[in-house]
Amino acid sequence: MGVPRLPPGARRRRIGWVRYRATGAARGGRASGNRIPGGHTVNRNTPGPGDEIPGRPAPQSPPFEEPTEPREPLPPKPDQHGPATVGPTGRATGADPAAFAQGGAFLTTAQGTRLYDTDHSLKAGSRGPVLLQDHHLREKITHFDHERIPERVVHARGAAAHGVFTGYGTAAKVTKAAFLAEDVETPVFVRFSTVLGSRGSADTVRDARGFATKFYTSEGTFDLVGNNIPVFFIQDAVKFPDIIHAGKPHPDREIPQAQSAHDTFWDFVTLHTEATHHTLWNMSDRGIPRSFRMMEGFGVHTFRLVNAEGATTLVKFHWKPKLGVHSMVWEEAQITGGMDPDFHRRDLADAIESGAHPQWELGIQTFPDSPEQTFEGIDLLDPTNIVPEELAPVQPIGLLTLNANPSNFFAETEQVAFHPGHLVPGIDITDDPLLSGRLFSYLDTQISRLGGPNFAQIPVNRTHAPVNDMLRDGMHQTAVHRGVAPYRPNSLDGGCPFQAGADTAAYIEVPLDVPAAKKVREAPASFADHFSQPRRFWLSMSPPEREHIIAAYSFELGKCYERAVKERGLQVLANIDPELCEGVAAALGLPAPKPTEPLASVEPSPALSQIGRTWPVDGRVVGIVADADCDLDGVREVRRSVLDAGMVPLVIAPTGGELGADGDPVAVQRTFATARSIEFDALVLAGAPGPADDALGARDAKAGDAVTRRNSATDPRVLLMLSEAYRHGKAIGGWNGAAGVLEAAGVPAGAPGVVSGDSGNATLGEITRLLGGHRVWERFQTA
């Protein structure tokens, strides 16, 4: 049950691409049963070149005319999968997932009565009043009026996917959790999200991201509910309403949306300096991931693991992406927010559809479970702290692969309910005061959002382990319980259910001595250090990353109205590092204050930097700029090579349709009007394309005015794409006379990451090498 297991060899990537190419369709084949990414065969009404590009909205292309012949609903796309078909009490039903989708060829009411018309209300004559007896109108409108449920207060904007987690068995010494045993495969559902924005906000805002994973284990559901930043703004959950109220839009105007660049946020974090470490991470490149696929995840808190002998170990959880940790630059994120506010959720869905299944290794840092609960002087119960990987290496314990998109966003992504208290034997909590509050808050939130205490019976939330509880009734109860004695002890139901012992894999909290203490509202003294960890993070950054942090603080504090808030922000930065403070102060036009306490003496942690390593290029998007007069044979070769490398080729041309009519046309995926640099990881030119007919300022402001067009041999929108890509540190190349276009775009010949080749494939080879580093970092000038 659950998500289909990965095919043999799935740990090597690009399965879908390989199967697809084998059909010849990637070269423009027109077989009646083209294969699409994922290796599934569907019938195409209008198959053609370029069908392998992800993003098709339905499993088959529609006809021009409205279909009138009754037929069963279409199946989901091959990349989609719904929740497992288990009952509300966790039992496998063996039912086909289609049994839970709409069925039949004809429109019906919710009760299954067929309808002959849904376009007109029942009226007394064609121009008469609508009749109250119109039961279909009332049912349809009433359901529509109640379609929405309250959005999450935080993490409202999300995207999700199904997958499978495979244990390595390497955690056996520290935990008895069954799903971490060697080669055990566990279905999962993973939801990524932003924190501050509403459901309708943009993906690429500067914000922390949620990384929540639901493991449907044989011992019950385990939820690892984390973020892409390993620390949090606060040390105690009682402050959570404060930080969120400060970060949310101002309550009088409801602006600004999905961002922290405003007075209330900075007023709070500059007064409540335990937020400094998280704020610094958020102002770094980590605050704007390139993709969910290229984002780390962290459990944030310290957890306690229990092995089969009862021995305990303290741990921190890490998700390490196979593609590396990469980010957008600020201008790129701003453009993306306007051009494609759904960029991250589209990227995730397209990667899965194309067969470039995202993968992460789950790892743990382990620490002795000592009474002090510290490690190398770092308080493990303080959620504003990290332990550098150089002091405690991350040990891989399993592999997560996302291999299916949801079949219904609301039913799955919107209704999935996570809770840090969903634990399994072998995993326990610690006394982290932030975690303690989350254990209450998450449960309380689900009851409010999902209409009552039975939210666990919603299909995406159903456990895959048998359920025999004594919870009864309540709103939306879908289980049909039997027996007459939902209490213990009882004899009328034969004594069932019985309590489980330790020898039957029961969940038993670790018995710990709680020292005698007075009830107080205070934090331990070790929680008072708010600057040594931020200083370590700053010192660990490369020069370009430091410049990006300075720019982020300059922008965010520059958007504040009150001078006192800006000055207070500078004082916080002065206690981290003079270079950081002086750079931001210069941008704000304010004096740089002196630190109010000695600068911490800490060692950098190179693992915190995103720069300096080489990563796989799976799923990278290569834009190929061409027109009918360019080297189309070279374009075809480059497309095939891009596909062979597990990347996505998108041809950009003056108009849509196809290039070349010689029997092997090249499909166009983007036009000069619809393309923008932010969509591509690299750009290659197959020549020197001229201006398109729609390069008119009245139609597209990016085309410039008549003088611009008259003085340019190339479409101004192509020049804009190239200049942006160059500024953003992306690999750029070309052949067949492309050098003149690059020069016109202000891209210096011979500059780092600018490739000029004798052929398309020669150019692409160097481009692919450059993509392994994500960006051409040498282009970023530093102070």
Image: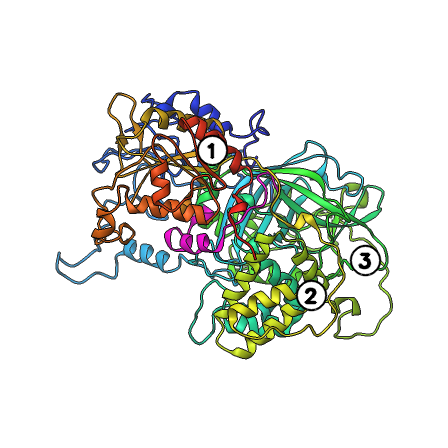
Q: How is the image coloured?
A: rainbow
- Which numbered mark, 1 or 2, is in the foreground of this view? 1
Q: Residues within 10 Å of mark 1 (few under 14, many from 20)?
A: many
Looking at the image, is mark 3 or mark 1 earlier in the sequence?
A: 3
- Which numbered mark, 3 or 1, is in the foreground of this view? 1
Q: In the figure, 210 relative to 243: above or below?
A: above
Q: Residue at x 20, y 42 (%)?
A: 693
Query: Is 407 on the left or on the right of 439, as rendered?
Result: left
Which residue is labeled 3 in the image? Answer: 374
Looking at the image, is mark 1 or mark 2 earlier in the sequence?
A: 2
Residue 326 colored magenta? yes
Please state the extent of the stretch shown in magenta in the rendering: 321-345
Please name the amino acid that badge 1 sits on.
Met
Q: Nearer the viewer, residue 450 or 743?
A: 743
Which residue is labeled 1 in the image? Answer: 647
Residue 516 colored magenta? no
Please name the amino acid that badge 2 sits on.
Gln
